[in-house]
Amino acid sequence: MTSSDHVEDQAPNEGVASLMADAEVPLLSDRPHVSTGDLPGDDRVLDAMRRALEMVRPDRRGATSSVYPALERVDPDVVGIALTGVSGRVESVGDDDATFTIMSVAKPFVLGLIGDAVGAERVRNIVGVNATGLAFNSAEAIERMPGGRTNPMVNAGAIATTALTPGDGLDERWAFLLGGLSRLAGRELAVDHEVLTSALATNHRNRALANLLYSQGVITSDPAEAVELYTRQSCVALDVCDASTMGATIANGGRNPCTGEQVVDTVMCHDVMAVMATAGLYETSGDWLWDVGLPGKSGISGVIVALSPGKGAMAAFSPLLDAAGNSIRGQIVAKLLSQELGLDVFAARPE
């Protein structure tokens, strides 16, 4: 069942601040405009990636994440960059074979998978889609927003989204999530058990968020199981080529450009990218859009993914983070490649 044919089994929560959420708005034509375009067809893509790598490699500002002990022990000098086009073309430079845990970059992909399965509007009505303006792990956001709604890119909203995972029991629900993430990447992924053990031992705040969501009625299933699933999805291991291919699948309307499999409904991909643009880099999302002009998502392991609809996606991994928990080198790489390769969805020149 896809987001386009799901029939709601419950009434929307009160307070959804959008008239568009309450009624179907007809299209003006049967061929609405979609974002398309091509990456440069010569060596400019790889050349731009090499120059970006050379530019950011000496930058040693920032620090590795202290959220989970296992993340503090990563090599701070690692830098890997990859770009996957909607044609299936994959280019990578630097430490492109370095593996890392996906962390919060899992959030938009899990949103796509779950929205596809249970209905986009159900997720929107329960979880919310508006920016909080608060830190990614804020409990205040749950109490401040109507109905406890935040958005699927912050921890509270992501836990609420994961709580909607279909299936009977933990194992079946986890198989749904891991299988979906693997199809997005185009290969079988697995959990980094060292990081998972570290995260499960120290994720007290996420447990508190889940219990608060449960008390507000946002989560109606077992909150402990929701946190378990959320922590597992965050600890899936991959490399920059996997991450860029996952992003390119969403940017390609849900079809994996490397395997040809339709993984997520096309309309759902629009919804995923809209929320990424709204809150993918949390309270710094406005600065990100100003500088990069792309839907993006960061993770505290040091990974950043940026999507250019109809063209592809780039991923960068560098574990030195700024105060907001975003990769410093990754942000610079995204800005450089967005400008150099014509990826920015807001950029235009007069004809």
Image (tube, rainbow, N blue to C red):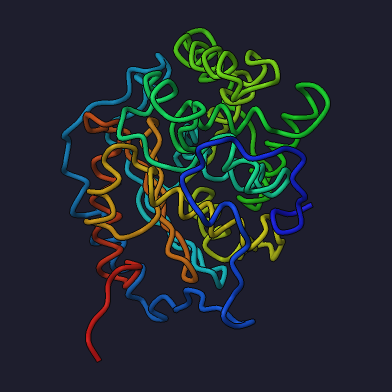
Q: Quadrant of the C terminus?
A: bottom left
- The percent position of residue 262, horizontal first and vertical second, equals 71, 61
Q: Residue furthest right?
A: 168
Count of all numbered marks drawn on residues in the image: 0
304 or 254, which lies in front?
254
Q: Does 287 appear above or below 154?
A: below
Kindly indicate the quadrant of the structure image that contains residue 154: top left
- The percent position of residue 266, horizontal first and vertical second, equals 63, 63
- The percent position of residue 30, horizontal first and vertical second, equals 64, 82
Q: Does 17 appear above or below 170?
A: below
Q: Residue at x 47, y 66 (%)?
A: 309
Kindly indicate the quadrant of the structure image that contains residue 45: bottom left
- The percent position of residue 272, horizontal first and vertical second, equals 52, 51
Q: Does 61 appear above or below 82?
A: above
Horizontal side of 114 relative to 146 (left or right) equals right
Q: Residue at x 59, y 75 (%)?
A: 27
